[in-house]
Image (cartoon, grey):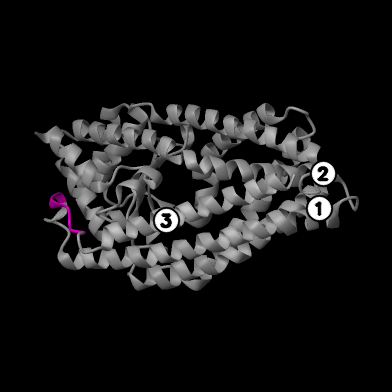
Amino acid sequence: MDYFIALFLIIVIAKTVWEIVIDFINLRYSTGPDAKIPDVLKDKVSAEDFEKSKKYLRDRTYFVMWRNLVSMVVDIVFVLKLFPVLEHALSGKSSLFVQALLFFGIYMLIDYLVDLPFGIYSTFVIEEKYGFNTTKLMLFFRDQVLSILLVLVIGIPVIAILMWLLSYSIWWWPVSLFAIAFVIFISFVQPVLIAPLFYKFSDLENEELERKLRELLEKAKVKVPNIYKMDASKRTKKQNAYLTGVGRSRRLVLYDTILSYSDDEILAIVGHELGHHARRHIPKQILVNSVYIAFILYLTNLVYDFIKSSNVFGVSQPYTVFSYALMFITSIIFFAEPLINYFSRKMEYEADEYSAKLIGSPEPLISSLKRLVKENLSNPNPAPIYKIWHYTHPAPEERIKRLAELKN
């Protein structure tokens, strides 16, 4: 079965090579001699801002290229050597659940330790260089420890259920149901239990802004029990706002870094988030993601059965075979990302349009988008192939032009 091993490696390598190729195309397109500030951004983005954004893009792109290359090498080492070695070391020495726990634990620990230097470099070198990072070293490692503890608390029962479900000959559909239920469960608990472990949420001090936000929520007929300010400035100077949660856990969250924006700009950004709810994007995304998860696991089940019956990698335990099968399928599915991103961008346009109509004018959202591009050093000139492949949101220039059409 050497042909399958060769195919496996070709797909894993092709995925990374293609990522690097489109990153390089985007870099050349966005920073080359023909790159220029889009006309719709010239009133906010200066030549100095543009040069700084190009340097930021260049540093981030080379960083991501190296990170992807190292990740690919680690995956290849696991495929050819470490997965079989781990299984042989663990088999027969304890229960299947303990074996799986140790297997996934060691796998994730190695992956984490390899990636940790990249996380440190990104935060304390690149983001620091461009004035975004406000994270202190102790806070960074506190976040790391909390993340590891969360993985343990959540991961142990997940692995136990997965091992039980893999005992069925056709397991893709019960695993799919479990995965979908798990995603919905996390959407409930993340705002009220997980996020507060990392950030402090407090009431808005600006009573006038809160009144305007409440009026906007009432106008949109969206029930949001809580509006909070989040202390994002402890980690970054970048700005954002989001609407999260389901039912009583739903909350509107404003980064404290975005409170320097005008009230109208903040209302327009929130209006965009409300647009996702008003246009029923959330249930649509849940449905699409559910089908997507089920499809991936269906294919994984087929590859799982093939690997187990052919003994292609010399492994037999369900946790090892599942790891091989899932890595193989997710590497292939990567090439379908443009299709998913297309529907996501379509929803973003709809949310923009809703915000403009809810506020009564597209101007505040246009103004906020321009500020976000300028202050976050966003790439104003992404390459078309890069947008198709990676952008879940339309490029700022495209969003602004569409909003301007509404104004006209």
Secondary structure at badge 1 equals helix
Q: Earlier in the sequence, mark 2 or mark 1?
A: 1
For residue 356, above or below residue 128: above
Give the magenta part as a residue range.
Answer: 35-40
Q: Is residue 384 magenta?
A: no
Q: Identify the residue shown where x is 23% and y is 58%.
A: 374
Q: Nearer the viewer, residue 250 or 292?
A: 292
Disc 2 versus disc 1: distance between alpha carbons? 8 Å
Secondary structure at badge 2 equals loop
Query: Residue 298 in the image: x percent, y percent?
Result: 64, 30
Say which amino acid is labelled 3.
Val
Residue denoted by label 2: 316
Q: Quadrant location of the N terminus? A: top right
Quadrant hosting residue 62 = bottom left
Q: Identify the residue shown where x is 14% and y is 35%.
A: 405
> Alpha-carbon neighbours of circle 3 within 10 Å: few (<14), some, or many (≥20)?
some
For residue 243, above or below residue 44: above
Disc 3 versus disc 2: distance between alpha carbons? 36 Å
Residue closest to the far right: 92
Does residue 242 appear to the left or right of 292 in the view shown? Answer: left
Does residue 376 appear in this view? no
Does residue 325 appear in this view? yes
Say which amino acid is labelled 1.
Glu
Find out whether the residues at labels 2 and 1 contact each other: C-beta distance under 8 Å: yes
Q: Quadrant location of the C terminus? A: top left
Quadrant hosting residue 278 = top left
Q: Identify the residue shown where x is 51% and y is 54%.
A: 16
Q: Nearer the viewer, residue 155 or 332?
A: 332
Q: Is residue 37 magenta?
A: yes
